[in-house]
Image: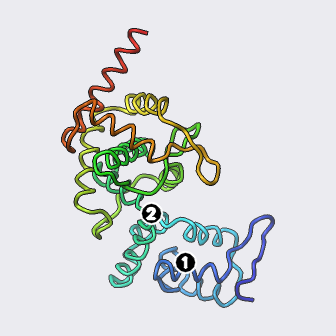
Amino acid sequence: MKGKRYEHGNDTIITSEEIKVILDRYRIGKKPLAKLLGWGETTIIRYMDGDVPTKEYSNKLRLLLDDPEYYYNLLVKRREHLTNVAYRKSKRAVLSKIMASKIYAVAYHLVNKSDADICPSYVQFLLYYAQAFSLALNDSELFQDEYNVNPENMPYPKLYENMKRCGIHTIDLSEDYLSPEEIRLIDEIFECFTWYGPKALYALSAFEKSVLRISRDKYNNKIIAKDSIKAYFKEILVHYNITNYKDICKYPEKRLRDIRETDIIS
């Protein structure tokens, strides 16, 4: 029966309705999806008609359902198995899904700028400083996500885990996911902060976290709210005489020097 859940042991097998979500979400046909996965042309058709996938095939389909980035990688790697029209249509759909959360557009702009020569944890530092200086200089958030306080020191853990799972790779951001002004700020953050290694940026952000107010979100998670980050970095603008994007470089240079001098004294 269509849509019925089957279980192999403790693992729930994907349903035909869930497979239909994949087809609709990524605007891909049954046969093209089977080709992308390297399966027989009629495999997806049979599953939609009631055949039960094996655990292995079900797990692969569920990855596509749960992880648009995984689907994007598969699409790009096996594009020769689709017509140009089918490839472009599906690519637009999956990019729209990935970039529905603005933080992903910012993150992948940074990844593209580095030509994918960057690690997921380092992207986290750059996202935080891009957000902080957007709040301070422009009085506007760059993305909605709150800074999450956790033992791993990854402020945006969902994106971090996705990047770790999928690996770092460039994504075609030809559509207007970011405004020219946002791109200008993000590029400046990249130029200013990538002079410093992870150890330096960890020390910098750890110092800030020690003085920023920690609060709770509606789910009772510990966060540093954007209002708190904004107020702190407004003070930074005054203290380091930062009036525009080009001045941002003053901050890591001078603050890290201050931190080093404090450590030497103590």
Earlier along the polypeptide chain: callout 2 or callout 1?
Answer: 1
Q: Quadrant of the C terminus?
A: top left
Q: Residue at x 45, y 47 (%)?
A: 226
**Residue placed furthest toward the top:** 265
* Secondary structure of residue under mark 1: helix
Q: Nearer the viewer, residue 197 or 233?
A: 233
Distance Cα–Cα, label 2 vs label 1:
19 Å
Image spot of residue 55 (x, y percent): 70, 69
Where 148 sits versus 203, above or below?
Answer: below
Which of the 4 quarters of the picture holds residue 77? Answer: bottom left
Image spot of residue 36 (x, y percent): 47, 75
Which label belongs to residue 22?
A: 1
Where 141 sits versus 194, above or below?
Answer: below
Between tags 2 and 1, which lies in front? Answer: 2
Left or right: where does residue 89 sit relative to residue 237? right
Badge 2 density bin: few <14, some 14–19, many ≥20, Cα 10 Å: some
**Which residue position holds label 2?**
101
